Amino acid sequence: MKASSVSYKRHRLPRDLIAHAVWLYFRFPLSFRLVEEMLLERGIVVSYETIRRWSLKFGAAFARSLRRKAARPDDTRHLDEVRIVIRDQPHWLRRAVDQDGYVLDEILQTRRNTKAARRLLTQLLKRQGLRPSRMITDKLKSYGTARRKLVLSIWHLSHKGLNNRAENSHLPLRKRERIMQKFRSRGGCQRFMSVFSAGHNLEGSKNRDLKTFPPDFGGARL
């Protein structure tokens, strides 16, 4: 998606400023109030509620833009799940990363069974358009069962010690979850993760332009 395809009509502030505020929120462990204070130090008066609305409106479009610019993943997939509690209800975030730790896909579910694992694999194959040659997971049996039900000819390695790539990918989200004082809804959590993971992938990006300020975010830093 090009920057021009994201409509900034009826917004009183410049596109670059809006994009910069959204980028700050998703790229770094900052609350809306902290982003508000950072902008205020530069003489820009914007409420944290306005920044929240910007994040909801533009976050998904920015994430799609970043994913299209990402390098082609290798042929290895690391799969893992982490427990997230939302309003006292346990949920499971299943995530797939490549050999470099880039988040390729993730889905929040209420079950930790074969059906849930199968959904992640199906979604991953559909979105990536490339069948990997290796799949590395921990010892959770649902991944192997899901692979067999989908009749995937993939070399499956099931060993906890080999899956550090996927397990380490949960750490940034855990840190952000503590700052946000947990997620308040399943839908809100899924939407946040979609943008947050795309932004966090920049840290290990080989593209220097993406590490600083993504071009489709609207221009140079403030």
Image (spheres, helix red, strand yellow):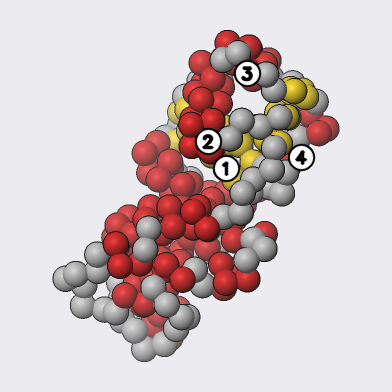
Q: Amino acid at mark 2?
A: Gly
Distance between the alpha carbons at the discs numbered 2 and 4: 25 Å
Q: Which residue is mark 3?
A: 152
Marks 4 and 1, the one that precedes in the sequence: 1
- Comparing 162 with 99, the one in front is 99
Does residue 113 sit above or below 191 in this rendering?
above
Distance between the alpha carbons at the discs numbered 1 and 2: 12 Å
- Comparing 87 with 38, the one in front is 38
Place of residue 33 in the rendered image (x, y in percent of width and height, measured from the top left):
40, 68
Q: Residue furthest bottom?
A: 43
- Comparing 50 with 123, the one in front is 123
Badge 4 local density, few (<14 within 10 Å), some, or many (20+)? some
Q: Nearer the viewer, mark 3 or mark 4?
A: 3
Marks 1 and 2, the one that precedes in the sequence: 1
Q: Nearer the viewer, mark 4 or mark 1?
A: 1
What residue is shown at x 47% (from left), y 80% (from top)? 221
Q: Which residue is mark 4?
A: 164
Of the 4 image quadrants, the one containing the C terminus is bottom left
Badge 3 local density, few (<14 within 10 Å), some, or many (20+)? some
The disc at residue 129 is 2
Q: Which residue is mark 1?
A: 104
Distance between the alpha carbons at the discs numbered 4 and 1: 16 Å
Q: Amino acid at mark 3?
A: Leu
Q: Which SS class for mark 2? A: loop
What residue is shown at x 60% (from left), y 13% (from top)? 151
Q: Nearer the viewer, mark 1 or mark 2?
A: 2
Marks 3 and 4, the one that precedes in the sequence: 3
Decide: marks 2, 4 in contact (CB < 8 A)?
no
The reply, left or right, for residue 187 in relation to residue 146 is left
Q: Which SS class for mark 4? A: helix
Q: Amino acid at mark 1?
A: Leu
